[in-house]
Amino acid sequence: MISFRFAEPSRTLRAQLGSLPLKVGRSPQCGLVLEQPGVWDDHCELRLANGLVELVPGAKSHTYINGELVQSPTRLRNGDAVTFGGAVGIFEVASPNRRGLRSRELTLWGILALVSLLEILLLIRFR
């Protein structure tokens, strides 16, 4: 799953991206619609290239990755800060194998804590 996390003054928005290629811009026909100043109707496109996500800038758009102007198709990496005109999003890639890992880890630690507590209670009782 890939997404962009946008921080606004009062909240953080997460835009999960569907299938690629995906147009980004102000136009309602875009897969990711951004209405901030400086965003063109067809600002850029996200597409898969050799299994990796790359950003293809529009002809007139001002798109930056980690502060560098993008002038040709550029690979996106997890954690990249992408500036679309006045909108800044953090590109995030979640591996399908790691999505539920946090909850499984918490469950496992909870079970281990419970088992340890039961062992302590048994030791105290049968001393």
Image: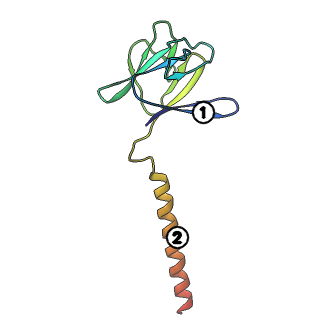
Locate the N terminus by quadrant: top left
Closer to the camera, 72 or 96? Answer: 96
Residue located at (54% from left, 18% from top): 84
Left or right of 1 in this view: 85: right
Closer to the camera, 21 or 125? Answer: 21
Give the farthest residue toward the right.
10
Residue count near mark 1 (Cα–Cα under 10 Å), binned few <14, some 14–19, many ≥20: few
Give the farthest residue toward the front.
29
Seen in the picture, residue 115 relative to 72 is either above or below; the reply is below
Seen in the picture, residue 26 relative to 53 is either above or below; the reply is above
- What percent of the width, then of the height, locates residue 120? 54, 81
- What percent of the width, then of the height, locates residue 25? 53, 16
- What percent of the width, then of the height, locates residue 3? 49, 33
Q: Secondary structure at mark 1?
A: strand
**Residue indicated by mark 1:** 13
Three-letter residue code for mark 1: Leu
Seen in the picture, residue 21 relative to 111 is either above or below; the reply is above
Residue located at (42% from left, 30% from top): 77
Left or right of 87 in this view: 29: left
Tell me the distance, in whole angstroms, between the alpha carbons under discs 1 and 2.
35 Å
**Residue indicated by mark 2:** 113
Q: Which mark is first along the chain, 2 or 1?
A: 1
Residue located at (38% from left, 47% from top): 97
Q: Nearer the viewer, mark 1 or mark 2?
A: 1
Give residue 10's quadrant in the image: top right
